[in-house]
Structure formats: structure tokens, C-alpha cells
Image: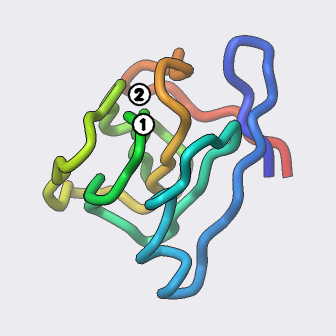
Amino acid sequence: MKLILNDKEIDILECESFKDKLFGLMFKKDFSYGICLNNCRSIHTMFMRKNIDIIMTDKQYRVLYIYNNLAKNRIVFPKRNVYYTFELPSNLNTYSINDILLLKK
């Protein structure tokens, strides 16, 4: 899957297993891709090596919450109506609340 940001395509890895969701981007030093956590309403940035952008959407990929440049060792507590959570490299997000994410499968 690819996410369209600023006329660029960012590769998105879909995390479906418990292990993939648990580790996410933890311990990754350099990454130019993002991950999609399905059925995920909260996250943490413990053990992250760098800041990340978070986009939380409903099942139709409508943006409900955005956290830009979220620092290491932070917690985003559970949010209502969230189904997909996207973890992206920092300072890439151009979406606003209520936008629909543009995805290519």
C-alpha cells in the first residue's frame, strides 16, 4: 500500500499480527516508509529513536486525529471511533482533520 503525501508516494507496511503491532517502528534508526496498524486506537513512542507523525482514521480513512512530530517516550491514549493508525516519518504529514487519506493498494 502507498500513501500519497505532497505528490509523493510513501510505502506503507500493513501490520496485522500482534508482534508487528507491538514493535511497530520501535528501534528503527532510519526509515522512509510508514506503517498502518489496523484496529488500533492508541500508541506509544517508547524505544523510538526519532520523532514520528501519527494519523488516526476511521474505517473509511477519514482523518480524526493528527500528531505531528510526536516526540519519543510519549503515549497517545485511546481515541474514539479510530480504526486505522498510521505511523509515518516526521514532518511529512499534509493532511487535516476530516480529510480522506489517498491510498494506492
User: Measured from the top left, where is residue 79 in percent x and y?
Assistant: 20, 55
Occupied quadrant, residue 5: top right
Occupied quadrant, residue 97: top left
- Please state if 50 lies on the left or on the right of 75 as rendered: right
**Disc 1: which residue:** 52
Q: Dot 1: what SS?
A: strand
Of tags 2 and 1, the one toward the viewer is 1
Question: In the image, what residue occupies the spot 26% across and 61% down?
Answer: 42
Whether 22 is drawn above or below 53: the answer is below
Q: Residue 32 carries which label?
A: none
Q: Dot 2: what SS?
A: loop
Occupied quadrant, residue 3: top right
Residue in front for this viewpoint, 78 or 50: 50
Question: In the image, what residue occupies the spot 43% across and 71% down?
Answer: 39
Structural crowding at the residue carrying mark 1, measured as other residues with C-alpha within 10 Å and reported as few (<14), some (14–19) or many (≥20):
many
Residue in front for this viewpoint, 50 or 76: 50
User: Measured from the top left, where is residue 103 in percent x and y?
Assistant: 74, 40
Structural crowding at the residue carrying mark 2, measured as other residues with C-alpha within 10 Å and reported as few (<14), some (14–19) or many (≥20):
few
Question: In the image, what residue occupies the spot 44% across and 60% down?
Answer: 26
- Please state if 51 lies on the left or on the right of 3 as rendered: left
Looking at this view, name the residue that lies furthest to the right: 105
Question: In the image, what residue occupies the spot 26% across and 58% down?
Answer: 46
Whether 99 is drawn above or below 76: the answer is above
- Please state if 43 lies on the left or on the right of 24 as rendered: left
**Disc 2: which residue:** 98
Q: Which amino acid does label 2 sit on?
A: Asn
Cα gap from disc 2 to disc 1, whole angstroms: 20 Å
Query: Which of the marked residues, 2 or 1, is nearer the chain's N terminus?
Result: 1
Q: Which amino acid does label 1 sit on?
A: Ile
Residue in front for this viewpoint, 26 or 10: 26
